[in-house]
């Protein structure tokens, strides 16, 4: 399956907007919102990360990732969530919260121990009671980034996500060690070819 997308050039920057597996975003007083519609995967996790990192760099202390319309998550997507949770906590003492995780997505995050890095469906969240209003205000993310499909950038992103998962706990370290090793070797090969 190919990811459908459109490219737009504005001010000599290229914007990548997915048309499947949408990432929708909004910026509110006290938090920023990211909603995944469809499967959370390696195909849309870099876009989510770019927006999340932009918000963290702008001083945001609370990121909410809405999984209410997320049909499932692959390991790259979950590793990206873990990385964003770690960065916002380490850098700003902030938090990443998961809204409307559903049983399947909650289990997936808990199975990898990511529930220790983020709050899943927090009972006292400031956004409770505002879900429908927030969701109606969201727009597709249009984060500035390099063209999608850059083999080196894509491999680096997938490797970083899996390194995050491996660092989360001993069980993950064993489970993802081969993936991390193979992705690291693949990245080195791609870098050598680019230098040649």
Image (spheres, rainbow, N blue to C red):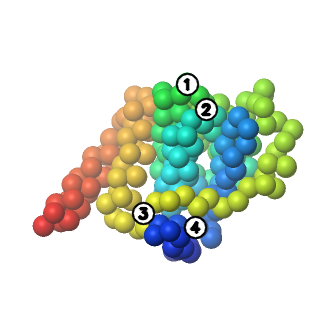
SS for dot 3: loop
Q: Can you name the residue that lies furthest to the left here?
A: 196
SS for dot 2: loop
Q: Which residue is mark 4?
A: 17
* Image position, residue 129 (x, y; %): 87, 38
* Image position, residue 52 (x, y; %): 55, 45
Q: What residue do we see at 40% from left, 52% from top? A: 157
SS for dot 1: loop
Find residue 146 and name its label: 3
Circle nearer the N terminus (2, 3): 2
Residue 184 sits above or below residue 64 on the image: below
Distance, label 2 to label 4, CA atoms, is 25 Å
**79 sits to left or right of 119:** left
Circle nearer the N terminus (2, 1): 2
SS for dot 4: strand
Q: Residues within 10 Å of mark 2 (few under 14, many from 20)?
A: some
Circle nearer the N terminus (4, 3): 4
Front in this rendered view, residue 71 or 193: 193
Circle nearer the N terminus (3, 1): 1
* Image position, residue 169 (x, y; %): 43, 29
Circle nearer the N terminus (4, 1): 4
Q: Residues within 10 Å of mark 4 (few under 14, many from 20)?
A: many
Distance, label 2 to label 1, CA atoms, is 7 Å
Q: Which residue is mark 2?
A: 61
**79 sits to left or right of 6:** left
Q: Quadrant of residue 103?
A: top right
The C terminus appears in which quarter of the rendering? bottom left
**133 sits to left or right of 168:** right
Q: What residue do we see at 70% from left, 59% from top? A: 139
Q: What residue do we see at 43% from left, 45% from top? A: 161
């Amino acid at each position: 399956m190919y990811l459908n997308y459109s490219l737009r050039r504005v001010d000599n920057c290229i914007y990548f907007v997915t048309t499947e597996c949408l990432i929708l975003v909004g910026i509110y007083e006290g938090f920023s919102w990211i909603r995944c519609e469809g499967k959370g995967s390696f195909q849309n996790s870099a876009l989510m990360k770019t927006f999340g990192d932009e918000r963290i760099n702008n001083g945001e202390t609370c990121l909410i990732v809405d999984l209410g319309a997320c049909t499932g998550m692959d390991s790259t997507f979950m590793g990206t969530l873990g990385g964003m949770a770690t960065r916002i906590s380490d850098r700003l003492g902030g938090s990443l919260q998961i809204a409307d995780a559903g049983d399947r997505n909650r289990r997936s995050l808990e199975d990898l121990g990511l529930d220790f890095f983020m709050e899943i469906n927090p009972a006292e969240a400031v956004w409770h009671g505002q879900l429908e209003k927030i969701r109606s205000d969201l727009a597709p993310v249009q984060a500035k980034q390099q063209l999608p499909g850059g083999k080196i950038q894509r491999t680096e992103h997938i490797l970083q996500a899996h390194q995050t998962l491996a660092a989360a706990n001993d069980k993950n370290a064993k489970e993802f060690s081969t993936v991390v090793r193979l992705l690291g070797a693949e990245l080195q090969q791609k870098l050598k070819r680019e230098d040649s």
